[in-house]
Every structure is written in structure tokens, then in C-alpha cells.
Image (tube, rainbow, N blue to C red):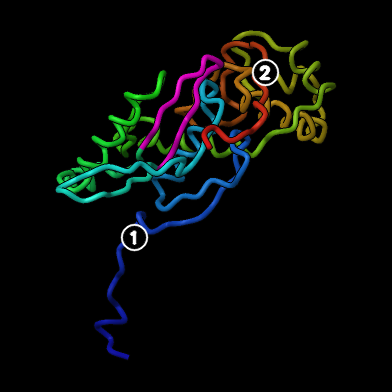
Amino acid sequence: MDKVMASRKIPKNYSNITGKLASEKSSTMLSYESKLERDFYFLFDFDQHIEKIQDQPITIEYMYEGKRRTYTPDVLLRYGHSPYYVLGEIKYHDELSKNFKELRPKFEAAIDYCSKHPNMQFKLFTDRCPQVRDESYRDNVRFLLSYKEIYPAYQHLIEENFRCFDTVGELLDKITADRYEQMEIVPTLWAMMRYHAFEVDLHVKLSRKTVLEGLGECVFPYKPERVLS
């Protein structure tokens, strides 16, 4: 084997990462074609204001330079019970800048489509989003999304012993000094954070030192359904 070729380092290409992930806000697995799309789907899933997520929801037909063309946006998000919709495209900022002349007619077609549908707008999601750029926030969101089970008995103990500005460790120690019992309780505590029962700073890595700033009602997941047929 050629030693020069064998020692060459291949740069990471996050645009070619593909896969599927499950979401409580979608009736099907969500497909992603880049690390950026995957990260945004985690953020969408965690966002308590978003009720439904649908990937590649529609195909829009439009005319450009005398030819009929099609464009399929990446995602459709449904906000609130009103409802309000966001039709979105997820792209790296550098890719947008490089290919904007080619992409512009597609985006204009999407904007025109949204103008004909009440309570809908078109939006670009890029890697310049602060939450996407914040590694600690992304890691915390992915961590919390893995906790979905809230056991009522443990939830009652947590709520009964909680005081504003307790740390995770202080709250668990008030409930029980037994570390094994704490290990049984803490998944419910993480799940309550996942459903936004606690106000916490997610820009700092979660740990026993995490400060629980406030306690509200858990926002349990909505029943998944297709947003747009």
C-alpha cells in the first residue's frame, strides 16, 4: 500500500451522516441526511412549544426558467393548539452562501406556498442557531430525551421535598440517604426535566450540582399524528 495515501487523513463530512430517529411528536421515524438535521430534530423534539414534527412533508411544484420543477422542504413543525405551522429547510450556513443562487427559486416557491396557507411561514434553520452551536445544551437535550418514564410515587417524593434552588444532589439527599434508592429515583427526576417540570440551566452539563430553579407541571407528550397529508 502506498504509504503516503495510507497516512492521509480524511476530513469529517457531517453533511453525509444519514439515519433515522424516533420522536414522540411524529407517527413515523424521522429521517436525517446530515448531523445538523439530526441535531435540529433533537431540539424540535425537546421544544415544548412544538406539538408535531413531520419530515419531508410536501413537494412543491414551481416554474423556473420555463421549466416545471419540484422542491421538498426538510420539515414541517406545528406549534400550539391554534395551530401555527413552520415549513423549514435545514442547511449549513456555508452551503447556503455557496449555493444560494441555485436554492433561491426553491425558497421563493416555498414562501409563495406558505402565503396561500393560513398561519404558515417558511424558515431556514442553520448551524448559526445558538442552541445548535452550544455543545453542552445539545448534549443535555439528547440526555434528557432518553428519559420518558415518570413514576407517580417518585414524582410525589420529588415534589414533596423540593425547594427552589435545590441542587439535584440536595434534593435526592433530602428524599433518602441511600444511594441505591437515589439511583431508582433519579430517572424520574430527569424525565420531569425532559417534560419541562423544572427550570434548569441547560447550557451547563447536568449533574448532581445542577440547580433546580423552579417547579411547574409536567408537559406530557402529545399524541403523535401526521401534520399534513
Q: Which residue is mark 1?
A: 12
The residue located at (38%, 59%) in the rendering is: 16
Whether the magenta-drawn stretch holds residue 85 is answered as: yes
Between 108 and 188, the one nearer to me in the picture? 108
Whether the magenta-drawn stretch holds residue 17 is answered as: no
Image height check: is 36 above or below 112?
below
| Magenta region, main secondary structure | strand
Q: Which residue is mark 2?
A: 218
Q: Which residues are magenta?
A: 74-88
How far apart marks 2 and 1 lie (CA) works out to 39 Å
Q: Earlier in the sequence, mark 2 or mark 1?
A: 1
Between 44 and 158, the one nearer to me in the picture? 44
Asked whether residue 154 appears in the rendered view, the answer is: yes
Instruction: Kindly identify the amino acid type of the residue bearing the numbered disc 1.
Output: Lys
Judge from the rendering whether residue 138 lies leftward or rightward of residue 154; answer left or right: left
Other-residue count near label 1 (Cα within 10 Å), few / some / many at <14 / 14–19 / ≥20: few
The residue located at (52%, 20%) in the rendering is: 49
Percent of width and height locating residue 28? 60, 44
